[in-house]
Image: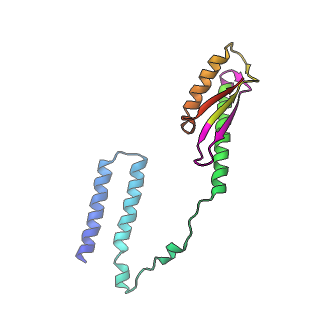
Amino acid sequence: MSSWLLSIAGIILLSALCEFILPEGQINKYIRAIFSFFTIFVIISPLPKLLNKEIDLSFLSNYDITLQEDFLDEFNISMLSAIEKDLEKDLEDRGFKNIKFTFAVDEENGKVDEVKVDLRELEFLDKVMNKKEVKEICEKLIKNISQLKTSKILYLE
């Protein structure tokens, strides 16, 4: 009984110490939730012994956890489609129209290897710029997207 009370006091003291040390924000919320879970677990841990029953957790091993590759593929496709539309919209807001982006994805690791920028139908809405300046802007925009930072950029003219 005393070890149980000591465990409760220890987990509460540890959670208070972590809450005091960690800054406010998202991580503090998660740490607080984790310590709350452990506190509840420590509090109810002697119940099976008091009831002379053991907790059977074998049902957890019966679940087969598999990746749903079709879902992940669809998610990646929709994410890349959204990035394409955002890039095209951003460039249109800057005065360039009809720039199309295509992503070449490596099937093994799912990363974007190459970004094709189609400038063949490029129209300047209100600015007079050359294609070199448009390429520089496209490259800056592409490199600002974390999924595309390491991708090669190929321009179609």
Residue located 50% across and 73% down the image: 61
Q: Identify which residue, 29 or 97, lies in the foreground.
A: 97
Q: Does residue 56 appear to the left or right of 23 in the view shown?
A: right
Q: Identify which residue, 110 or 25, lies in the foreground.
A: 110
Residue 17, horizontal then vertical, whole percent: 28, 54
Q: Identify which residue, 80 or 156, lies in the foreground.
A: 156
Count of numbered labels shown in the rendering: 0
Whether residue 93 appears in magenta in the rendering, the answer is yes
Figure quadrant of the N terminus: bottom left
Q: Does residue 30 appear to the left or right of 110 in the view shown?
A: left
Q: Quarter-wise, where is residue 135 in the image? A: top right
Figure quadrant of the C terminus: top right
Residue located 73% across and 18% down the image: 125
Q: In this view, does 138 lie above or below 129?
A: below
Residue 139, horizontal then vertical, whole percent: 59, 26
Residue located 41% across and 52% down the image: 29
Q: Quarter-wise, where is residue 142 in the image? A: top right
Whether residue 155 appears in magenta in the rendering, the answer is no
Q: Does residue 108 appear to the left or right of 50 in the view shown?
A: right
Looking at this rendering, what residue extends furthest in the top direction?
128
Residue located 62% across and 35% down the image: 114
Q: Is residue 59 above or below residue 105?
A: below
Q: Does residue 14 appear to the left or right of 114 in the view shown?
A: left
Q: Quarter-wise, where is residue 145 in the image? A: top right
Looking at the rendering, the stretch of residues picked out in magenta corresponds to 92-113
Looking at this rendering, what residue extends furthest in the right direction?
121
Residue 52, horizontal then vertical, whole percent: 37, 87
Q: Is residue 153 above or below residue 133?
A: below
Residue 107, horizontal then vertical, whole percent: 63, 47
Q: How is the image coloured?
A: rainbow
